[in-house]
Image (spheres, helix red, strand yellow):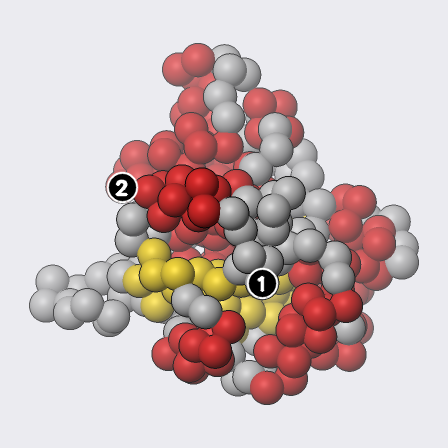
């Protein structure tokens, strides 16, 4: 196993224009889990120029108003505009807060089959809906241990991360105490992070960070960097305030950690 320590990422050029530094589409959210995609968008919006957001479920007006106020840099899109937004995007994140339904299952797998050249990050609900036959080298899956067990029908371990990535021709980021990342050739791990990061939503922050970085970097470089930066943000907060931080605090700490290490 290889320890993640040197981050090599593409940074914005001084003469950049809007759109040059990443366009991301996020598909997720439901009446029950409307906060999850917001956490992903909050993290991603620090690094990309534009985020399109599509929720398969119609949310009530109060929830929508709250979401729009919290995601100022994102554009809410309708189903009829989704495919056009995916085409414009450098990467697509699917699954945060996504409900388990037959229609969502069809949507997840249709997008993967319709856009095989597009980079995808699959998290949370999408991991329960994806057909493993639709995984390819442009897909990164980001399960925690229980999601890994359900997705690949085997117990999560570093060895299985490497094996499943190779078997399915995709990339895997296993979220746990130490994150493990593999492209099926090598396996990488990080040693930072702490028990304060077990709180709900921290995985959504990590997924959003992965997808944002993937807009202008390889999926492997993005997964490695995201795992390390997320853990480092958690450690930064722990030094300041112990375990008393939440997922939004983690997302808000990312720019500080990013500026010091990239």
Tell me the residue at 29%/53% (across/down).
73
Q: Cβ–Cβ below 8 Å for labels 1 and 2?
A: no
In the rendered structure, find residue 56 and report the number of the disc placed on it: 1
The crowding category of the residue bearing disc 2, from other C-alpha atoms within 10 Å (few below 14, some 14 to 19, many at least 20), is: few
Q: Is residue 177 left or right of residue 151?
A: left
Count the numbered circles shown: 2
Q: Earlier in the sequence, mark 1 or mark 2?
A: 1
> Which x, y percent locates residue 99?
69, 54
At a point 51% along the width and 73% down the height, the residue shown is 79
Q: Nearer the viewer, residue 249 or 36?
A: 36
Residue that sits furthest to the front in the current view: 61
Q: Position of residue 139 (x, y in %)?
A: 60, 71
Q: Is residue 78 visible?
A: yes
Quadrant assignment, res 249: top left
Q: Residue at x 55, y 37 (%)?
A: 202
Quadrant of residue 201 within the rendered picture: top right
Q: Is residue 159 visible?
A: no
Q: Disc 2 marks which residue?
A: 259
Q: Is residue 30 above or below residue 218?
A: above
Front in this rendered view, residue 160 or 70: 70
Residue 258 lies left or right of residue 38; in this view the side is left
SS state under label 2: helix
Give residue 25's quadrant in the image: bottom left
Q: Is residue 66 above or below residue 127?
A: above
Q: Rounded to the nearest whole Å, what is the CA distance between mark 1 and mark 2?
A: 35 Å
Residue 48, position as x, y percentages in the image? 32, 59
Secondary structure under badge 1? Answer: loop
Q: Horizontal and vertical percent for residue 1? A: 67, 51
Q: Left or right: where does residue 10 sit relative to residue 176?
A: left
Crowd tier of the residue under label 1, counting other residues whose Cα lies within 10 Å: few below 14, some 14–19, many 20 or above: some
């Amino acid at each position: 196993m290889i320890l993640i320590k040197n981050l090599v990422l593409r940074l914005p050029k001084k003469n950049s224009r809007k759109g040059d530094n990443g366009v991301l589409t996020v598909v997720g959210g439901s009446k029950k889990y409307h906060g999850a995609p917001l956490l992903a968008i909050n993290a991603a919006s620090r690094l990309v120029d534009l985020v399109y957001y599509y929720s398969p479920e119609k949310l009530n007006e109060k929830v929508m108003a709250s979401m729009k106020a919290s995601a100022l840099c994102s554009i809410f899109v309708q189903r009829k505009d989704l495919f056009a937004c995916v085409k414009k995007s450098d990467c697509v994140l699917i699954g945060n807060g996504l409900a388990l339904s037959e229609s969502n299952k069809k949507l997840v797998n249709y997008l993967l089959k319709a856009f095989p050249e597009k980079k995808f990050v699959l998290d949370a609900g999408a991991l329960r809906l994806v057909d493993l036959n639709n995984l390819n080298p442009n897909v990164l899956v980001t399960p925690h241990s229980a999601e890994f067990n359900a997705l690949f029908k085997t117990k999560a371990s570093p060895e299985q991360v490497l094996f499943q990535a190779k078997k399915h021709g995709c990339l895997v980021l296993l979220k746990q105490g130490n994150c493990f990342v593999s492209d099926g050739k090598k396996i990488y791990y990080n040693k930072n992070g702490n028990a304060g990061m077990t709180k709900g939503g921290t995985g959504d922050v990590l997924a959003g960070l992965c997808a944002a970085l993937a807009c202008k970097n390889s999926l492997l470089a993005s997964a490695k960097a995201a795992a390390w930066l997320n853990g480092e943000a958690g450690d930064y907060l722990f030094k300041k305030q112990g375990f008393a931080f939440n997922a939004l605090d983690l997302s808000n700490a990312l720019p500080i950690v990013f500026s010091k290490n990239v």
